[in-house]
Image (tube, rainbow, N blue to C red):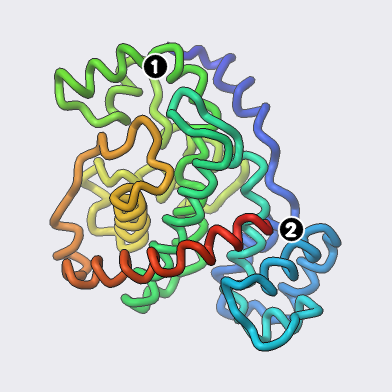
Amino acid sequence: MISVQKLVQAIDQLKPLPQVASHLMKIADDPQASMREIADIITHDPLITADLLRMCNSAYFGLPRKIESVQEAITLLGLEKVVNLVLIKCCRANLGRAQKGYGHQEGDLWRHAVSTALIASDLAERLAAEARPRIFTGALLKDIGKVILDRFVADGFGMIDNLVQTQGMSFKTAEKKVIGVDHAELGAIVAKKWQFSDKLVAIIQHHHLDCPEVRDDLEINLVYLGDTVGMMLGLGGGSDGLAYHFYGETLKRLKISDRDIQEIIMRFSEHQPKIEALLDMA
């Protein structure tokens, strides 16, 4: 079991999100937020601005001309995509590390996070969900607890795997039994410490949908489904892989058909080389 002291020490070892990311997360869900306001926040960080422009000019977007300013990026791509690109860049420092306990090489967890965020965002757009920025952010940061829990999982992996294999537990449930906390629960603690909104904390804590009380929540369902599709595609699933329960009623609840899922998988697979090129620039 992890002591409270060890847990706090481990959380403090995370790199805090850059101020630009924190500010953007606070206003991204505000329908009154202006292009000028968001552009000003980004341009105050020259390094983030440079990385943003490089990503905007990648093959992923295939724009007919070079983007040379944040304002131009917002005009051509829209506020939502620009904010998402900044968050992708800002999350790499923590999520890009190797997590040996989970079987992740360097960059695996970050690529999984970005991929599932893009899938969840695609699903949200199909359903005309209003809180798309929060859905993207929740999907991107849902596994932040793994960054901290990694070494404890590595130490107890034999016992965790045994519970998964012999008792049919989900990896998350086995984590909790062996270590005393699971990665989603720990991720929610990090989210609170970083002063995320209550809704974003809930998305991170319940993204495996194993709590019946949240199964009617649209945003949590979309992040869960994005994560599930990402694991089905083998995108950085790691040693926990598909060792989670699948809640098939989610598709019925969201009125998403098997064909919809197949189309998303096909489109994502077609764009994957471009996505990889985008991430190489981040």
| Above or below: residue 85 compared with residue 74 | above
Q: Position of residue 33 (x, y in %)?
A: 64, 77
Q: Residue at x 50, y 25 (%)?
A: 100
Q: What SS does tag 1 mark?
A: helix
Numbered circle sitting on residue 179: 1
Residue 111 is left or right of residue 120, and the answer is right
Q: In which quadrant of the rendered image does the N terminus lie?
A: top left
Q: Position of residue 149 (x, y in %)?
A: 49, 25
Q: What SS does tag 2 mark?
A: helix
**Amino acid type of the residue that numbered disc 2 sits on in the rendered structure:** Val
| Above or below: residue 206 compared with residue 258 | above
Q: Earlier in the sequence, mark 1 or mark 2?
A: 2
Q: Residue at x 18, y 71 (%)?
A: 259
Q: Position of residue 35 (x, y in %)?
A: 70, 81
Q: Quadrant of residue 154?
A: top left
Q: Quadrant of residue 243?
A: top left
Mark 2 highlights which residue? 20
Numbered circle sitting on residue 128: none
Residue 121 seen: yes
Q: In which quadrant of the rendered image does the C terminus lie?
A: bottom right
| Above or below: residue 191 compared with residue 146 | below
Q: Residue at x 66, y 88 (%)?
A: 64
- Pointer 2: residues within 10 angstroms few (<14), some, or many (20+)? many
**Amino acid type of the residue that numbered disc 1 sits on in the rendered structure:** Ile
Contact between marks 1 and 2 (CB within 8 A): the answer is: no
Disc 1/disc 2 C-alpha distance (Å): 34 Å
